[in-house]
Amino acid sequence: MKAPVIMQTQAHKRLFLGLLAASLLGILFLIFGLWYLFFYPAKSALYHTIFLIILLFVAGGILLAALGALGIVITLLAAKNFPFLQAPIRLAIHLLYPAALALGRLLRIDKDRIRSSFVEVNNQLVKARRIKAAPDQVLLLAPHCLQWTGCPHKITVDVNNCRRCGQCYINDLLELRDRYGIKMGVATGGTLARKYVEEYRPKAIVAIACERDLTSGIQDVDRLPVLGVANERPHGPCRDTCIRIERVEEAIRHFIG
């Protein structure tokens, strides 16, 4: 039988935003330190020229990332999309997310809490864009660990191989697929997930995975809107995981109206 879903505490968006801001400040202090070294007198003119070019290039990227971080906050507060901020927001996430994880490690904050907070921020940013798609333009990506470990049928090749016995949540997801007319794929990892994206060419994605896979997947397809739903792991990682179906359905309905 299916294991009951264990309610896990979701990290608040403030955690990721706070680490993002702290990482940005740390990088700015680093730039000021480099600027001080630039004016250190015992250097040649060639050294100063090369160093200045590198410093200006780095400073330009940091300024854009700072604009992106500000854009994230503005978008979340206004619950409204600002198209001209999309490129800086993507840059801020790609540049500052690793720094936020590193800072969290120093502060001994659980990485999954940070990732969960990032997914919450991403979901709010996606919802602010108010993207609507036809049902067949929405792709539901599910991890193979939702399948019952005792099942002999291989559904990563074809999800329709599922016998719908009700032992796991794949049956519930197939019912959502049939009810709303969306596409669905079950992936064993990022490579197969990208294959489904290339095959179906969706306009929007609803992704189910652990926090680690969600954050990497969201960044892999950063130009596509992805609503992430973290799975529950009562038996440990990658084994008979669970999902709150109502959250998946809510994400689907957001895209198709």
Image (cartoon, rainbow, N blue to C red):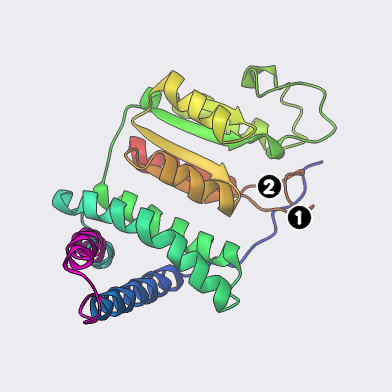
Above or below, 226 relative to 99: above
Q: What main secondary structure does the magenta stretch of the protein show?
A: helix
- Which residue position is annotated with label 2? 242
Front position in the image: 39 or 126: 39
Image: 169 above or below 62:
above
How many numbered marks does the figure carry? 2
Q: Secondary structure at mark 1?
A: loop
- Examine the image and state in which quarter residue 149 appears: top right
Q: Is residue 183 above or below residue 226?
A: above
The percent coordinates of residue 188 (x first, y second) are 65, 32
Residue 31 shown left or right of residue 101 in the figure:
left
Circle on res. 234: 1
Kindly identify the amino acid type of the residue bearing the numbered disc 1: Pro
Distance between the Cα atoms at labels 1 and 2?
8 Å
Q: Residue at x 48, y 42 (%)?
A: 217
Q: Which residues are magenta?
A: 38-67
- Residues at circles 1 and 2 in contact by the CB criterion of under 8 Å: yes
Q: Earlier in the sequence, mark 1 or mark 2?
A: 1
Q: As displayed, is residue 87 above or below residue 22?
A: above
User: Is residue 247 visible from the viewing direction of this image?
Assistant: no
